[in-house]
Each structure stands twice: as C-alpha cells, then as structure tokens.
Image: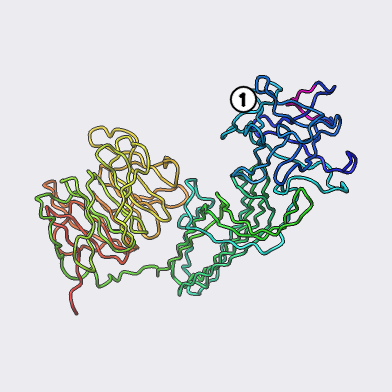
Amino acid sequence: MTSQDARYFIIRDLAHRQAVRGGDDHDRRAYHDDPAKRDNALWRFEEADPGFYYIVDRKHVAALWAGTEMERVCHEKAYHGKHEAQWEVLPTPDAGVYWLRNRKTGDDLVAGDQHDHKVYRQKAHDRRNGQWTIELTNPDATMKGGPRNVIVDEQVVGPVTFTERPADDLEIPPLLVVDNLRVTNATTLDQDISLQHTITDTVTTTVTTTHTASVRCMSALTIELGNPKVAGVSIKTQTSAKYAFTSARSMAQEVSNILTVTIPVKALKRSEAVVSTLLRRKVVKVDFEAGVRRVLADGSVRLDTVKGQWQGVEYITAEVDVTDRPLGSTTLPTSRLGRWTAIPRFGDGSAPRDLAVGGDGMVWIASDGNQVRRWNPATKTYDTQIEVHAVRITADDRGAAWLIDSDSVVRRIEPPRGSEHAQLVTVSPRLREAVDLAAGKGGVIWALAGEHPVGGGDTPLLRWTGPAWEPVPGIKGTAVAAGTDGLPWVVTAQGRLFRHEPPSTWTEVQQSAKDVARSAETWVVTPLSPAGDSAVMVFDGTAWQTAPGAGAARLAVSPDGVPWRISGEEVSYLATEPS
C-alpha cells in the first residue's frame, strides 16, 4: 500500500473536538490540535495482526507509539513488529465513537482533560477526551484499508416501521381555543353555517439518539365526529416530519403541522348551537426499526437492522363539541321530578364539606375528617378513599377530581384504572386565598383565588390551561361552576349571579344565589330568608324552576342533569319517581 492510494482518516476526540497529529517537523511526538489541512493529521490504518492496526500519518509515515516518558504518546518511524505501535479499535456504546487501545500496555489513547495540545496513554474509562470519531477524508481512494468495524457511510434501504407509545399532554397553553361560540338561529328556517380555522405550527427540537440514519415520513389523519343535530364535524390534520440522525449522537427534528378545522353546523330553526374546539399538543416516544446499508472502512458492506427510539415527537389533537338546544324551552327532564334520596354516610363521624360529579358519573365527596371518598352510583358503594384535607373539590370530564387543600395548593386525584390505585398529585404551587374551583372542558380549570377577601368579600377569577394560572378580568366572586359547555358562572358575596359570554362579557342573571352548579343547565342554591333557609332552583334557559324539598349547603350536577346536594350531614340526589 502506498501513501497515495490508501484511505486516510482524521481522529477527533469528543470532548475538545480536536484531532491527533504528528509534529509539523518530525520530532517523534504526537499532538492534539486543529488538523488545518495538515498531512501529519491524516492517518491510515495498517493491519498488523487481526484486530490490531498501526496508525500511520501521511506526511512522515510514522506510527503512533505508546511511549514511556510521562505517559506521552510518541510518533515513531520504526514501528513494524512493535506491539507498542499496535492499536485495537473498540466501539463505545455510542454509534460512530471508538476507544483506541494499545496492544502492549492496555492503555487507551487519551487527550488532556484540559486541552493542552498533548496526547497520552491512560485508561479512558468514560472520559469523552478518550473517545474518538474516525472520519474518512478520501472515500475515492483505490485501496480500501481501514478498521473493519468503523462505519464510513450508511443509507436507509429497508422500510422504516414505527410503534407509538402512550402520549402525554405538553404542559403548554392550547394552540386554539374556541370557547363556547354561540350560533343562534331565531328564524323559522334551518340554516347551514360553516366555522373554519387553519393553523400552521412548526416545532424543532434536538434529542439524543444512538443510531445513525436519515428518514422522512409524512402522515395524514382525518377525524369525523357525528352529531344528530349538526351536519357533521371534520378535523383534517396533516403532519410532515423530518428526522436526521448524526454520528454525534444528536437528532435534529422538525415537525410541521397544518391543521384545518371545519365545523359545518346546521342551526335548526329557533335554536342555538354552542360550539367549542380545543387543539392541544401532545408528546410521544416512538420506537422505530429500519434496514440500513453500512459501508465499513475496509470497503466491505453490511446490511443491518437498527432499532431505536425518537423522543419528544410532538403532534396535535383536537376536541370538538357541538350542542344544540331549542330557544324558549321550558320542559323539565323527568330526573328533576321526584324526591331527594340520601346515600350512606361515611361511618366515621365526619360530615361532608363539598362534593362534585365527574364526566364518568362518579361522585367525589370531601369530608371534614380529612378524607375524600368516591361514590359509585352503579354499585352503590364507596370504591375509593384518599387521605387529604380538601376545602373545595370539583371533577373534570375524564372523571379526575381536583381539589384545594388546607394550604391553598391545587391537587388532582387520578381515579383508579384497572389494578392501579387512585393517585394524588400536586398540580400547581400554592394559590393565595383560594376559595373555590370548577372544572371546565379539555383540562381547563377555573378558580377563585389571588387576594384576601375583606369581610367575606369577593375573590378574583383565575383560569388554568397548563403551566400557569391566568387572571380573568371583569369578575370576582365566592363560588364558581362550569358545565358541559365549559362556560363559568360566578356567584358574588352579595348573592348576585353572573354568566360568562365569550370573549370577555359578564352578564348578570336575575336570580340571587349562594352556590351554583352546572351541567347543560344551571342549578343554584338561592337564599329564602336571613335565617339561612334556602331552595334549590334550576334555570332551563328561559325560566327558573324550584326543585322539591329544602335547600342545600353545597350543590353539584351530573353530566346527565341529576343534581346532588349536601344538606346538614347528608348527601343526596334528586331521584326520578317511577311513572
């Protein structure tokens, strides 16, 4: 092999990204510098014995030598047959990165811990200045010599398969919120109205990988949501993702999402359609497998199957809800006819303090005995118990309970799933003077907190959509509720009742109240006398109706419109009487 037709490589460490070189004049020393187009920084690998190589520079034709003076690596011309000049190329756990180990001493080629322009023979262990990339500089060389396990080129030649793991929500604000947009048709004819939003969202991240490859994938998804009262809901999502892997163990990932959300609403005559849309980013880990053709430094070709995992792959999900109700309806559902039916008490002498009903119909009850229990209406049993001092409690559409504890910290109880028990997690840092909270739609939580109410006065309204609480201008109160449409209603200390009209209007409802609960309709506890007498009332969109029996201390409503109350030490619901 001649110096003109051999393959030459630059040997560069991971810590300083500098290269091994011989002296510009042959001084029998090895150095660690910028290669800067130096022939004495270009090295060929001559096989001495199977698995061992002389590493010889192009300029002086001298080999790296494990010297004895102060552990310095030397650069000698008389190298043939000498074990001090023979090196083994060993792959590290990171693809494309190697240890160079001397045959005689067992030491590794190591640059200085601090860049001192020298090269040593030491134990590398996990030091990055003892881990090297071997970069081919002349791929067109006629002789293909080089370490058999060093990859100089690779291409994806086989199909790439993907397996997505369960996704997690990103704790960032939603990309788009259409918050209860009301479409009213007061005419005597049905009307078709198209609501459309288009969003382009690009995300670029860098994550860690242990494989080298380049792939490109594109996916498209169309979700069709049906509703008997609308013409149809269509969400079309197109995701284009480009993933580039490099031997430096980093992956540059760019994901572009173009979303068109079209909601064709059929607004029936004399009706009002309420439309809500929530777009969120999710993040998922994707396991992949691909066929790769690899060219090795000695000129041989190898077909491999690589497996790895993309981390931090982001995509977008959409939730759309359309409800339709006739204008001027005064009919009460049969569930409000009948009597209040009590469920069993806790049995430990504690009294209920607050209650909430989740989207799954389960009833969460907080007691003054520092316990939160879940009542299952189907089995008529308490099936979950968590020890926590809950001052106020609500439940979201997934069935998870959210609470304010005695330190004004907002926490969430994830309900039991299969063999897993319920989990209590902290959601946000301490809120100042929190007095009430209510679950909206799609993870939105409303809370009254933020300043000390003077003399039992009102507290500002806050909105939680992910990483932080956002103030909601124009309203303060003592109680808050949100129903199936996600809109908050607020009760003030003076007993006034306000409802939110997007985007920023608060409209007073002519009804006094001291507590409020919402499903598709609005329920309140209204005071009847200074002595504390009260009644439970429901607003059907046109008029207020009074429920049978006495009032309540706290009120909640199930998704199907069944009210629950705390009265004294009793929890009860308004049961349907048989017809």
The vertical placement of 186 against 294, above or below, is below
Q: Nearer the viewer, residue 186 or 30?
A: 30
Please tell me which residue is depicted at 47% across the width and 46% down the height of the picture: 171
Task: Residue 446: say if magenta.
Answer: no
User: Which residue is the extreme one toward the bottom?
Assistant: 579
The image quarter containing residue 332 is: bottom left
User: Which residue is the extreme one toward the front?
Assistant: 81
Q: Nearer the viewer, residue 79 or 171?
A: 79
x and y percent of residue 390 in the render? Answer: 24, 45
Within 10 angstroms of label 1, few (less than 14), some, or many (20 or more) residues?
few
Three-letter amino acid code of the residue under disc 1: Asp
Q: Quadrant of the C terminus?
A: bottom left
- Tell me which secondary structure the magenta stretch mostly adopts: loop
- Left or right placement of residue 505 versus residue 43 in this view: left
The vertical placement of 485 against 331, above or below, is above
Q: Quadrant of the N terminus?
A: top right
Q: Secondary structure at mark 1?
A: loop
In the picture of the structure, the residue carrying the numbered disc 1 is 113
The vertical placement of 155 against 47, above or below, is below
What colouring method underlies this structural image?
Answer: rainbow
The image quarter containing residue 109 is: top right
The image quarter containing residue 222 is: bottom right
Please tell me which residue is depicted at 56% across the width and 55% down the height of the picture: 315
Q: Which residues are magenta?
A: 28-37
x and y percent of residue 144 in the render? Answer: 82, 49
x and y percent of residue 75 in the render? Answer: 77, 27
Q: How many numbered marks, from 0 up?
A: 1
x and y percent of residue 86 in the render? Answer: 72, 36
